[in-house]
Image (cartoon, rainbow, N blue to C red):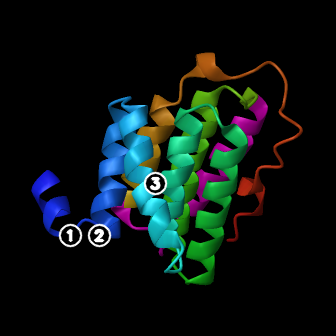
Amino acid sequence: MHDALVANPDEPILLNNKTVALVRLKRYSDADVAAKRLRSNLNTTEPEPTTLATLGLLDFSKGNVSGGRNCYAMAAEKARKLGLPDLEFRVRAHWLYEEANAGVLSQDIFAQIVALMDDAASKAWIRPTSVETWNALKARASISNFVAHADTTSQIPFLLFDK
């Protein structure tokens, strides 16, 4: 990836993938540097849903739940406006996983969202690979991360997932 970025230093897909990889490796300061370059592209182009979701992932990983929610919400809405229900589904799957890992959801809210996502996963326009991703993320969400009460400040728009 490094060689590809040397040749194409502002390529959004490469910067996006690098940012995700660095977050997953818990190299947050390096991820911030990559994300800064990714964000600089937002000034000149309309942000793609995947870019917004990656910025949400980075915010969640650094404990910025509000920023993460904002980015994921914009990513889901952008995918919806572009008529990409499968991408919207994947954005929401990753968003829910980050919410669960942040420890800000009650089990009840999580269960409600899982039911909506499971229903959406059965729709014809959701690709099998997206359903596999959803099932893997759902299985990895640790029960120990749930809080004993609902986070009433979040107003998580999962409940608005269109059928």
The mark closer to the camera, 2 or 3, is: 3
Q: Position of residue 122 (x, y in %)?
A: 52, 62
Mark 3 neighbour density, 10 Å: few (under 14) some (14–19) many (20 or more): some
Residue 87 visible within the image:
no
Q: Give the magenta part as a residue range.
A: 108-129
Whether residue 144 can be seen here: yes
Q: Residue at x 51, y 45 (%)?
A: 57
Going by the numbered disc 2, the residue's amino acid type is Glu
SS of the residue under disc 2 = loop
Disc 1 target residue: 8
User: Whole-Å distance between the Cαs marked 3 and 1?
Assistant: 16 Å
**Residue 66 — which label?**
none
Q: CA distance from mark 1 to mark 2?
A: 5 Å
Pick whichever of labels 2 and 3 is earlier in the sequence. 2
Relative to 70, is 141 above or below? above
Pick the front one: 70 or 11: 11
Q: Which residue is mark 3?
A: 36
* Residue 4 x, y percent position in the rendering: 14, 62
Dominant SS in magenta: helix
Which residue type carries mark 1? Asn
Look at the picture and state if 38 lies above or below 57.
below
Quarter of the image where one finds residue 136: top left
- Please name the residue that numbered disc 2 is placed on: 11
Q: Is residue 86 left or right of residue 26?
A: right
The amino acid sitting under disc 3 is Lys
Callout 2 touching callout 3 (CB < 8 Å): no
Q: Residues within 10 Å of mark 2 (few under 14, many from 20)?
A: some
Q: Left or right: 134 with respect to 83?
A: left
For image coordinates 77% across by 32% down, the residue present is 108
